[in-house]
Amino acid sequence: MAGSGNTGITRIIKAFGFSMQGLKAAYKLEEAFRQEVWLLIVATPLALWLGDTGIEKALLIGSIMLLLIVEILNSAIEAAIDRFGGEIHELSGRAKDMGSAAVFLAMVNAGIIWLLVLF
């Protein structure tokens, strides 16, 4: 190979490893993520039981998965900002508030989907 970069299956394997490290870190370090993982564990069998169609089941489970994704992105934003120091800065606060707002909207989205599908 001409370059030192990983390609093909090696890249995929390494990317998978990095993803697993990220999931482990999120679960270990982020209380909200842990709570949402447990919500997914409880909600998945409920969704499979209560959803009438494959689409309903996918919406119910997918809405909680989306919440987990947004939570991880919010945690990543917070970690990156905190990495640069503890000084108060308007843009840092705005970024953290926007990440929190994204999590809130993902929660509202999940709630609306569950209500609409089940009632």
Image (cartoon, rainbow, N blue to C red):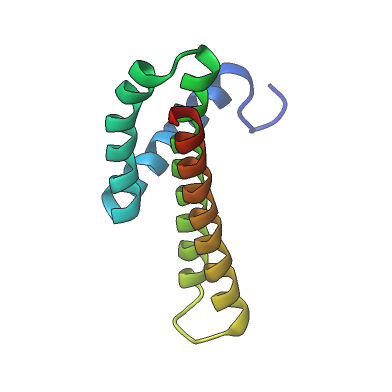
Say which residue appears at 33% left-offset and 17% top-offset: 49
Residue 118: image x %, image y %?
43, 29
Residue 75: image x %, image y %?
45, 57
* Location of the N terminus (image quadrant): top right
Residue at the farthest front position = 119
- Check the image and report above or below for 76 versus 88: above
Residue at the farthest top position = 53
Q: Is residue 106 visible?
A: yes
Say which residue appears at 64% left-offset and 33% top-offset: 4
- Check the image and report above or below for 94 versus 54: below
Residue 20: image x %, image y %?
39, 34
Say which residue appears at 57% left-offset and 76% top-offset: 92
Say left or right for 23 vs 105: left
Say left or right for 79 vs 7: left
Say left or right for 90 vs 100: right
* Location of the C terminus (image quadrant): top left
Q: Is residue 65 visible?
A: no
55 vs 95, nearest the viewer: 55
Residue 96: image x %, image y %?
52, 69
37 vs 10, nearest the viewer: 37
